[in-house]
Image (spheres, grey):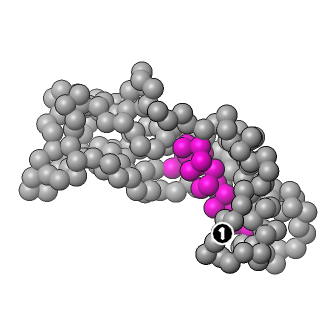
Amino acid sequence: MTTALLVPPALEPVTLSDAKTHMRIDTSAEDSLISDLIKVGREHVEHVTGQKLLSQTWRQYEPDLPPGREVCARVGPVQSISAVTIYAQDGTPRVLAGQEAWIDRTRHQTSIAFAHTVVPAESVNGVEIDLVVGMADTAIEVPGSLRHAILLLVAHWYEFRGAVPADQQPVSIPPGFETLVRPHCEVRL
């Protein structure tokens, strides 16, 4: 039902040097701003595509195990399950063993399947699933079109940062952005 970021990516798919080269900036006066724009650009690309770019850990909270004993992953692409905890009515946690929960990629959407021996939760939001997600572990493994889309966003937002008040940003998306990200967008039914 709900997700929360536990461990953010260790790096960004675009370096500060890449962005400054792309924008032809030689000084370091605005490195902090450009670094912030890179992070926001990555987050925007992740939102638009429905996929996390670099390895990061998210916790997914579920009210209980559904009758079919499968829970759809709400973030992805899923690399691995790092932990699953089920809470009893008194709040006592039970961490599942590795063979009690696994990734099921046989359907349209990746899900987490549970063994029939797993006792359902007895408390509200009694299931916590920690997932390592992301397309890649390193920046170079992120598709070039998505890295270029981030560079377009960074340059565009840098250039037009004073034209519109901060509370109305981002005011626009640069031409070509949609073309670069469209092939990577998650299909939602």
Q: Position of residue 26 (x, y in %)?
A: 90, 69
Furthest-left residue in view? 90
Which residue lies under the disc numbered 1? 169
Q: Classify residue 36 as left or right of residue 16.
A: left
Vertically, is 148 above or below 25?
above
Q: Classify residue 127 as left or right of residue 177.
A: left
Q: Amino acid at mark 1?
A: Gln
Kindly identify the residue that appears in the image at 38 percent across and 52 percent down: 3
Q: Position of residue 108 (x, y in %)?
A: 45, 26
Name the quadrant containing residue 118.
top left
Q: Position of residue 42 (x, y in %)?
A: 64, 54
Q: How many labels were placed on the picture?
A: 1
Q: Classify residue 120 as left or right of residue 99.
A: left
The reply to whether residue 61 is in sight is yes
- The residue stretch that appears in magenta: 34-56
Vertically, is 43 above or below 129?
below
Q: Classify residue 173 as left or right of residue 127.
A: right
Vertically, is 167 above or below 182?
below
Q: Name the element at disc 1.
A: loop
Kindly identify the residue that appears in the image at 13 percent across and 36 percent down: 119
